[in-house]
Image: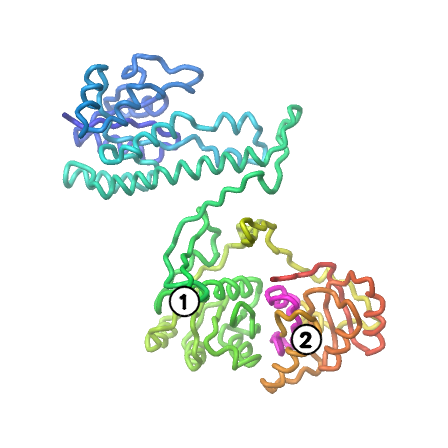
Amino acid sequence: MSMRALISVSDKTGIVELAQALHSLGVSLISTGGTAKLLAEQGLPVTEVAEVTAFPEMLDGRVKTLHPKVHGGLLARRDVPEHMAALKTHGIDTIDLLIVNLYPFEATVAQPGCTLDDAIENIDIGGPAMVRSAAKNWKDVAVLTDASQYAGVIDELKTSGKVSDATRFALSVAAFNRISNYDGAISDYLSSITFDAAAAVPTRSEYPAQANGRFVKLQDLRYGENPHQTAAFYRDLHPAPGSLVTAKQLQGKELSYNNIADADAAWECVKSFDVPACVIVKHANPCGVAVGKDASEAYSKAFQTDPTSAFGGIIALNRVLDGAGALAISKQFVEVLMAPGYTPEALEVFKAKANVRVLEIALPTGGPTAWDKGLNLTDIKRVGSGLLMQSADNHVLTRADLKVVTKLQPTEQQLDDLMFAWTVAKFVKSNAIVFCKDGMTMGVGAGQMSRLDSARIASIKAGHAQLSLQGTAVASDAFFPFRDGLDVVVNAGASCVIQPGGSMRDQEVIDAADERGVVMVTTGVRHFRH
């Protein structure tokens, strides 16, 4: 008995070529509505589902495949005599291949003018029902839910006359994943709506009443944050260009959980600079950040901030690395190196350092949206039996946002250093105090319970690195609640300070800055990072 294929697709990409290949292999074609019309126009012999079911399509096509002659043909187990006898009794033929993709619900609700009626009309019922039937009966039926699967199935049919067990199972898993994602998207959309019969376009909450996270596993990891923990690495269904999950590993050992977490911190920071920059991260904090004329100079400056912490660190560059820069970096112990590209000479240098994980990540294309910039829209933190969700901290400060609150005005150089320091502070764990000068971090104090202690630690680390803090710019990720925090950074050598402002004692802190003869600018924005 020849094989039978039922084809019912919303997205017609590659469907004619698939149907032609199936026909040439002797597979009988059954189809619905628009798909049947398209195949018939191509001269392919096709039987409409309405002929198979002896029941016309109705309710504007809402009911066409929801029929025992379709689902019986998909669900019947070929190895169960009672199933096959039931098919014979009721005149039902088996269906061996199902090719279905669903109404474009996700694309529809992504349109800004989408109405509730538009969304409801694009909820597929018959498609998911058929996919579930075929996927459940994977031992006998191959279900194709994406055009990327067509070529592989045709190759198997040409080679062996059947679809292998392994492929049918993989197709079943992909089908159930697709249905899960589809239903999740419907739940996300509908549970975000505040119903208003009078509204042409419904009001949607930024956070749906039910959140349905959908991620694809990239790899299992050897262990988690510590060796007694297990771990795996997942990506979004549709990752933004220029994000860490798009990285291509060119060489080195397998990435660990901590490598990935630190690499993300470094990559997100280095992406925020428009000029050549280098970020060195250790234990989730930047320990050295600098800009320069090229990747090599930026690295050299960043390394000077804290050579001790840079040992075994994660290095991110936002420009192609050349041979000279690679030679400089290869002199230190580095766990992970990231850049948008490498010259052949640079790659040759690291061949001698086989354990170094070298990643190539294309920079995002840029544009108005977070997606264009390769940024997350939301951040998620796990808490006991729950999640905290927030919009990601994608705020970008411009010079026009700055408010000079002291009598002393900043010079152009000070403004450059203040903007640089502020950019770095955004990626340092709170409480964060960052000293900078000439496009280079001079001291970084991170993660302390007291802002005073963060400032003192930054000074101590600068001393260990034999860096002078005289004339530096200082960024504080949140306001100074008292003047003592300002006094500590000025005593260390700061000549100008950037901070959010907004404290009840702002005037006391501003008066202290005037008294000490330093510049202070406020941003009106804080950057806690926990």
Residue 220, position as x, y percentages in the image: 37, 57
**Residue 206: image tag:** none
Instruction: Indicate the amino acid at tag 2.
Output: Asp
Residue 41, placed above or below residue 309: above
Residue 263, placed above or below residue 298: above
Residue 205, placed above or below residue 127: below
Residue 462, position as x, y percentages in the image: 62, 82
Q: Earlier in the sequence, mark 1 or mark 2?
A: 1
Q: Is residue 439 magenta?
A: yes
The colour mode here is rainbow
The single residue placed furthest to the bottom in the displayed view is 466
Q: Are marks 1 and 2 in contact (CB under 8 Å)?
A: no
**Residue 227: image tag:** 1
Mark 1 residue element:
loop
To which residue does mark 2 refer? 453
Identify the image quadrant of the C terminus.
bottom right
Residue 494, position as x, y percentages in the image: 72, 78
Q: Is residue 78 left or right of residue 258?
A: left
Magenta stretch bounds: 420-444
- How far apart in space, not on screen, are marks 1 and 2 (Cα)? 31 Å
Q: Residue at x 74, y 59 (%)?
A: 524
